[in-house]
Image (spheres, rainbow, N blue to C red):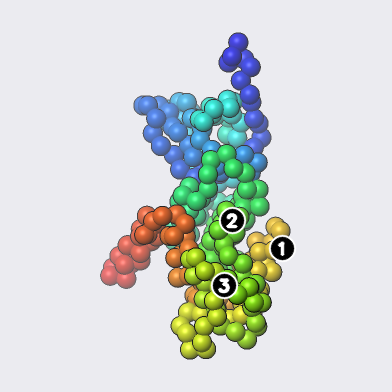
Amino acid sequence: MAAMNARRTSDELAFVLHRYDWSETSLILDVFTRTHGRMALVAKGAKRPTSQLRPVLLPLQPLLLAWTGDGEVRTLKTAHWCGGHVMPVGESLLVGTYFNEMLMRLLARDDPHPRLFDGYAQAVEHLALRGQSPAPAVLRAFELLLLRESGVLPTLGAEGSSLLPVQDDGRYMLSTEGGLHRVGPDARSALSGACCLGLQAALDSPGDFDGLVAACRGGAVALQGQLRSLLHYHCGVQAFQTRQMMRDVQALVRHA
């Protein structure tokens, strides 16, 4: 009777973030869903050669999932590919894996973030299409959106300590605890006030990930180190595994 009454959820948009072996034939999936947030699913029999789930449960692919249960780990029933784009490859695949690692480290389970989900879907599409936007701008845009939606990004429209409005002609740095602070004109890797205000406006525009990517283009280099420090601080790591992998691959390419 309990099994018959198990709660069923169907047609949920989702992406697989990571998969773990569970028994000889099954997998545990860490998935990011639009209306339920990040959650764990068991895919029974998914490792069998004849399983219909096996070719579908891939990362960076939009899926429609159905599952049952309301515990910490639910049971996957069906999974269907939504189509739309192919798997990112090369450097774009590594960037997408980095996205997934950040989501798993920064998001709690069962905490919905529909805007972040939509931004993630658009970011993955950018990576799959390549040439639509420079990869660094897409990366910075997703990092900003993730920090914003998880509630740890300081405002980019005012100084952190004084709350004075950001000035177009000012130069600013983003610190882990103090937010934005104004620096001298010769400070390296500083953001212009105009760039900060443009980023804040894009973040305040719901559903406009492309606008956020465009706002990041001019400040992608300056944002890189500052956002990385914020992410390391809030995730409690000194380096992300996928970023280290990217550096190792780039070093091999240079010396090939």
In the rendered image, residue 114, in percent from the top left (x then y), is placed at 65, 48
Please give the name of the residue rendered at 43% of the width and 60% of the height, measured from the top-left corner. Answer: 232
Amino acid type shown at disc 2: Gly
Marks 2,1: beta carbons within 8 A = no
Please give left or right for residue 102 compared with residue 157 in the image. left
Q: Residue furthest bottom?
A: 186
Q: Which mark is residue 151?
A: 2
Q: Which mark is residue 76?
A: none
Amino acid type shown at disc 3: Ser
Q: Nearer the viewer, residue 162 or 69?
A: 162
In the rendered image, residue 194, in percent from the top left (x then y), is placed at 64, 80
**Label 1: which residue?**
205
Q: Secondary structure at mark 3?
A: loop
**Label 3: which residue?**
161
Marks 3,1: beta carbons within 8 A = no
Please give the name of the residue rendered at 32% of the width and 62% of the height, measured from the top-left corner. Answer: 248
Which of the marked residues, 3 or 2, is nearer the chain's N terminus? Answer: 2
Q: Is residue 176 above or below residue 69?
A: below
Amino acid type shown at disc 1: Ser
